[in-house]
Image (cartoon, rainbow, N blue to C red):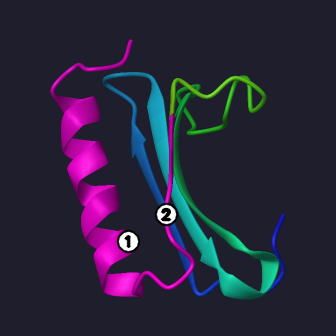
Amino acid sequence: MPKNLVLDLKDHLPERGLLVSTVFSPNDRLAETMVFHADAKGRILNAGEPLYEERYSLDSSPEDLAAAHQRIVERARAGEWR
């Protein structure tokens, strides 16, 4: 897990059995959103096999990444991933 997170967003969608995670850590050269299957408590069931993964430029702003996270949460709520 990155040590110096600038952004760490998690949205658990229990009605869909999903967790959407967005992390941003320029020091660790990491900016990504992933969608995972999750249990009823929001724990990731298989971290090695995300249902969806999107990586971003390291010069992205936290605000842009938060907006991208929200768009992916809406896609998950709409049933894009099962």
**28 with respect to 43 (left or right):** right
Left/right placement of residue 59 relative to residue 49 reads left
Q: Quadrant for residue 66, please give it.
A: bottom left
Q: Residues within 10 Å of mark 1 (few under 14, many from 20)?
A: many
> Could you say which is closer to the camera, residue 60 or residue 48?
60
Residue shown at 39%/87% (left/top)? 61
Check residue 24 in the rendering and tell me which mark sits there, or answer none: none
Query: How dense is the environment of label 2, judged by Cα within 10 Å: few (below 14), some, or many (20 and up)?
Result: some
Residue 20 lies, in percent from the top left, at 46, 45
Amino acid marked by disc 1: Leu
Residue toward you, 7 or 16: 7
Residue 76, position as x, y percentages in the image? 28, 32
Nearest the eye: 30 or 4: 30
Q: Which residue is mark 1?
A: 65
The span shown in magenta is 53-82
The residue that appears at 81% across and 72% down in the rendered structure is: 2
